[in-house]
């Protein structure tokens, strides 16, 4: 029958009087009984290693999320737009990076694609036609990154810009700059060379005039 440590100890103490009459064997039996009772008490008081059910928030590892991102994170600024974006991301997404990717695809990239699809191949190569949607896309991605406290520029945005240039501006002609005419090169090279002797003569004349005055 199992007995708690305290009960075992009491039983052993009661047995002490009766065992004392048995001599040396009785004393050994009584000592073994006390030892077993003490070990039983230590086993009950020793916590099981690896299991700590403390729910203190300070023991939660950094970055651990209880399902949806329940931890209140910093927002880029206190504007209403940023506060709404931060609340949406923290309540509906596991990470703000996932939220940022979704937002720029819906709010930034989709309007940009819609505008670009209405332009012809010739219009796509004219900066005046694409300057406004291009700037709007840049500002949109940067503003959302600042609100969600995400570094900008980032790898996601850089990849999107590369894809945009490869898709819309690949066929646009590029202006190649060649070497200037030989006459221009000759004038640019000879001008400083001719000025060197003139500067030397002026320095020598200035020095001589100074010596004569002294």
Image (spheres, grey):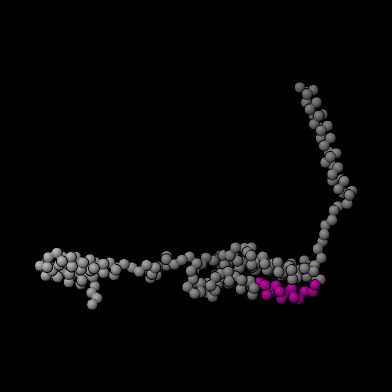
Q: Is residue 129 in view from this perspective?
A: no
Image coordinates of residue 14 in percent, x first then y, are 14, 70
Q: In which quarter of the image is the C terminus?
A: top right
**In percent of the image, x 61 and y 68: which residue is there?**
144
Question: 202 and 152: which one is in front?
Answer: 152
Residue 180 shown left or right of residue 29 in the figure: right
**In percent of the image, x 18 and y 65: which residue is there?**
28
Question: 27 and 164: which one is in front?
Answer: 27
Residue 26 picture quarter: bottom left
Q: Is residue 204 in view from this perspective?
A: yes
Magenta stretch bounds: 108-121
Residue 162 shown left or right of residue 194 in the figure: left
User: In the current view of this chain or complex, which residue is farthest to the bottom?
Assistant: 1
Image coordinates of residue 35 in percent, x first then y, are 22, 66
Image coordinates of residue 108 in percent, x first then y, are 66, 72
User: In the current view of this chain or complex, which residue is farthest to the left?
Assistant: 21
**In percent of the image, x 88 and y 51: which residue is there?**
181
Image coordinates of residue 10 in percent, x first then y, are 17, 70
The total number of labels drawn is: 0
Q: Does the magenta stretch include residue 75?
A: no
Q: Is residue 113 magenta?
A: yes
Q: In which quarter of the image is the N terminus?
A: bottom left
Kindly report the secondary structure that dominates the magenta region of the rendered protein: helix
Residue 77 picture quarter: bottom right
**In percent of the image, x 87 and y 46: which residue is there?**
186
């Amino acid at each position: 029958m199992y007995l708690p440590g305290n009960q075992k100890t009491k039983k052993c103490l009661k047995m002490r009087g009766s065992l004392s009459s048995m001599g040396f064997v009785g004393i050994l039996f009584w000592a073994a009984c006390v030892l077993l009772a003490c070990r039983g008490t230590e086993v009950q008081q020793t916590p099981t290693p690896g299991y700590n059910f403390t729910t203190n928030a300070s023991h939660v590892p950094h970055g651990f999320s209880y399902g949806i991102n329940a931890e209140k994170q910093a927002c880029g600024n206190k504007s209403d737009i940023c506060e709404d974006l931060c609340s949406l991301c923290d309540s509906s997404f596991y990470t703000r990076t996932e939220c940022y990717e979704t937002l720029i695809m819906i709010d930034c990239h989709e309007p940009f694609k819609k505008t670009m699809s209405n332009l012809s191949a010739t219009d796509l190569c004219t900066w005046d036609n694409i300057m406004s949607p291009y700037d709007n896309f840049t500002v949109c991605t940067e503003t959302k990154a600042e609100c969600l406290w995400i570094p900008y520029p980032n790898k996601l945005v850089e990849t999107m810009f590369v894809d945009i240039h490869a898709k819309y501006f690949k066929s646009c002609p590029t202006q190649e700059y060649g070497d200037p005419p030989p006459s221009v090169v000759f004038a640019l090279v000879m001008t400083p060379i001719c000025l060197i002797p003139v500067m030397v003569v002026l320095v020598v004349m200035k020095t001589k005039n100074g010596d004569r005055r002294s």
